[in-house]
């Protein structure tokens, strides 16, 4: 009987720490819902001690998401563990994950402590966590650079103390596959009570080896993999969920000892969702989820794939949720056709909201003549907001050119009233943002501006993602339109609403 690999997703904890990727509670909840549809085994929902808003987000996910275990991170400090437990105890399947650095550089350099003291803290933390929660995971942080004898000692003692999952992190992404595999073998050989625990791995991608290291660990006996959607995470990121899952599935013969229970058809949808909410686009050549991952440009390859798909494709795009769009909507498509297509894409829209989206769809359809699934996704991302909209975008008028300075007028709705302001200045985007500042009285510092076309052709929908600084936080905004200036303004209004929401809490 092959063993199940436990997929432990840490998108909401490790990836959420990426600069500029911070999510609000509603966005975290949205991703958690999709992670449950993806059928991950464990969702690491956050680090409750880190902030009251993260505590609340973890608590809501624990109370409302069914299916996966919900895990919270804590240092080996009582207050951290208490907070983690209070945040997750509403889940039918709660898990506490506690960690402490065990390499010399962490013990001496960062904690100014010694091996004995750290060992005692780890044992006490696991015992305390077990007194609250049935399932406890322990991580000796920087395990890949920890002295092996000491690592075995810590692992044995924490299992003795009640840890059921021992996670071996390559915190700095330093390991190479053969070496990391041997580390797992060493633990299996030298830790006498290892049969009472599951070995997990948590690899970082600083050398581009996170997936390779995780697979090598599985070959050597690890049975839980910690990973993130799109491989996001600190620095170069974490083990990529989609690559791990599809490697095990596609090379089933090679990995015949193991399987995962991931619903692979949800891979592309969740990749898009995470990319949009975190405001971090996926590289076109990214394995599995990049926009070119299933594109064939050379004539020989195109010809081959048409005659027989597997000549140049090792994965059926449908397996990861890439649906060839069979139906393309046009300006003649009715409300029902639109509703049906949205339903297929996973949006259940009725009544007034449908009317509003239909109007928006018609504007796009008139301009583009053909509306593809990707266009609908962009419209929906723009229309369906996760937070209350204090300001609603109404219209924009721009006068601009190479020989004149730009003049822009923007109209926003606030509490049922339209407020209009105009400014003149450098360029259309800059003046649009200044006009919005005049309306909202909330000047924001723009730190990132990104524009991307959704489909091909000069009438394509443009997606604009921006980041602004709000105190210590970066806030991401999103806007879409066939007019890039309008998309830019919509993204800015989105960010304004998020900032107002964040500041009100
Ligand atoms: Zn990490």
Image (spheres, rainbow, N blue to C red):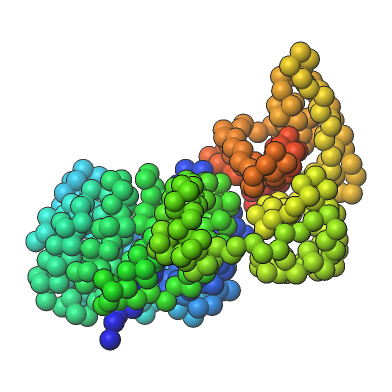
Q: Which residue lies at the image location 60% right of the left edge and 35% below the top edge?
A: 449
Q: Nearer the viewer, residue 371 or 172?
A: 371
Q: Residue furthest top?
A: 403
Q: Residue furthest right?
A: 417
Q: Nearer the viewer, residue 433 or 280?
A: 280
- The image shows residue 111, relative to residue 202, as above or below, that is above
Q: Which residue lies at the image location 57% right of the left edge and 33% below the top edge?
A: 447
Occupied quadrant, residue 359: bottom right
Q: Which residue lies at the image location 69% right of the left edge and 32% below the top edge?
A: 443
The answer to whether residue 121 shows anywhere in this view is no
- The image shows residue 148, relative to residue 218, as above or below, that is above
106 relative position to 61: left or right: left
* Residue 478 x/y as whole percent: 65, 46
**Count of all numbered marks drawn on residues in the image:** 0
- The image shows residue 133, relative to residue 415, as above or below, that is below
* Residue 214 x/y as whole percent: 28, 61
420 relative position to 216: left or right: right
Which image quadrant: the N terminus? bottom left
* Residue 155 x/y as whole percent: 19, 68
416 relative position to 54: left or right: right
Q: Which residue lies at the image location 25% right of the left edge and 45% below the top edge?
A: 110
The answer to whether residue 440 shows anywhere in this view is yes
Occupied quadrant, residue 393: top right
């Amino acid at each position: 009987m092959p063993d199940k690999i436990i997929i432990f997703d840490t998108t909401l904890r490790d990836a959420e720490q990426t600069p500029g990727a911070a999510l609000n509670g509603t966005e975290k909840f949205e991703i958690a819902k999709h992670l449950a549809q993806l059928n991950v085994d464990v969702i690491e929902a956050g680090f409750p001690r880190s902030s009251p808003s993260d505590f609340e987000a973890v608590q809501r996910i624990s109370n409302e998401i069914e299916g996966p275990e919900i895990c919270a991170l804590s240092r080996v400090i009582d207050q951290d563990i208490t907070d983690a437990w209070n945040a997750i105890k509403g889940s039918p399947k709660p898990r506490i994950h506690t960690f402490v650095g065990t390499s010399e550089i962490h013990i001496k350099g960062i904690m100014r402590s010694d091996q004995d003291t750290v060992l005692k803290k780890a044992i006490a933390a696991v015992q305390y966590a077990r007194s609250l929660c049935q399932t406890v995971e322990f991580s000796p942080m920087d395990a890949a650079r920890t002295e092996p004898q000491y690592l075995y000692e810590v692992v044995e003692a924490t299992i003795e103390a009640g840890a059921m999952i021992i996670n071996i992190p390559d915190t700095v992404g330093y390991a190479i596959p053969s070496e990391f595999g041997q580390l797992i073998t060493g633990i299996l050989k030298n830790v006498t009570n290892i049969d009472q625990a599951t070995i997990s791995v948590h690899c970082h991608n600083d050398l581009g080896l996170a997936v390779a290291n995780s697979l090598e660990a599985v070959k050597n006996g690890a049975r839980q993999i910690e990973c993130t959607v799109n491989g996001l995470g600190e620095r170069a990121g974490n083990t990529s969920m989609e690559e791990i899952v599809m490697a095990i599935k596609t090379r089933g013969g090679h990995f015949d000892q193991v399987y995962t229970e991931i619903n692979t058809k949800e891979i592309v949808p969740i990749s898009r969702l995470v990319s949009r909410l975190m405001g971090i686009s996926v590289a076109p050549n990214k394995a599995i989820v990049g926009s070119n991952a299933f594109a064939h440009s050379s004539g020989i390859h195109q010809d081959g794939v048409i005659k027989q798909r597997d000549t140049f494709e090792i994965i059926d795009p449908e397996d990861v949720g890439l649906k060839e769009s069979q139906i393309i909507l046009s300006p003649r498509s009715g409300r029902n056709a639109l509703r049906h297509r949205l339903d297929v894409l996973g949006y259940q829209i009725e009544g007034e909201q449908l009317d509003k989206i239909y109007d928006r769809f018609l504007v796009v359809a008139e301009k583009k003549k053909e509306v593809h699934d990707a266009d609908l996704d962009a419209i929906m991302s723009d229309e369906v907001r996760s937070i209350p909209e204090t300001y609603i975008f109404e219209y924009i008028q721009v006068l601009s050119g190479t020989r004149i300075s730009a003049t822009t007028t923007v109209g926003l709705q606030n509490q049922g009233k339209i407020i209009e302001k105009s400014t003149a200045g450098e360029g259309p985007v800059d003046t649009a943002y200044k006009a919005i500042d005049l309306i909202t009285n909330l000047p924001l510092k723009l730190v990132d501006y990104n524009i991307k076309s959704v489909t091909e052709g000069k009438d394509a929908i443009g997606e604009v993602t921006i980041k602004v600084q709000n105190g210590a936080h970066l806030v991401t905004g999103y806007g879409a339109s066939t007019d890039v200036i309008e998309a830019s303004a919509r993204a800015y209004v989105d960010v304004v609403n998020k900032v107002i929401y964040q500041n009100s809490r």
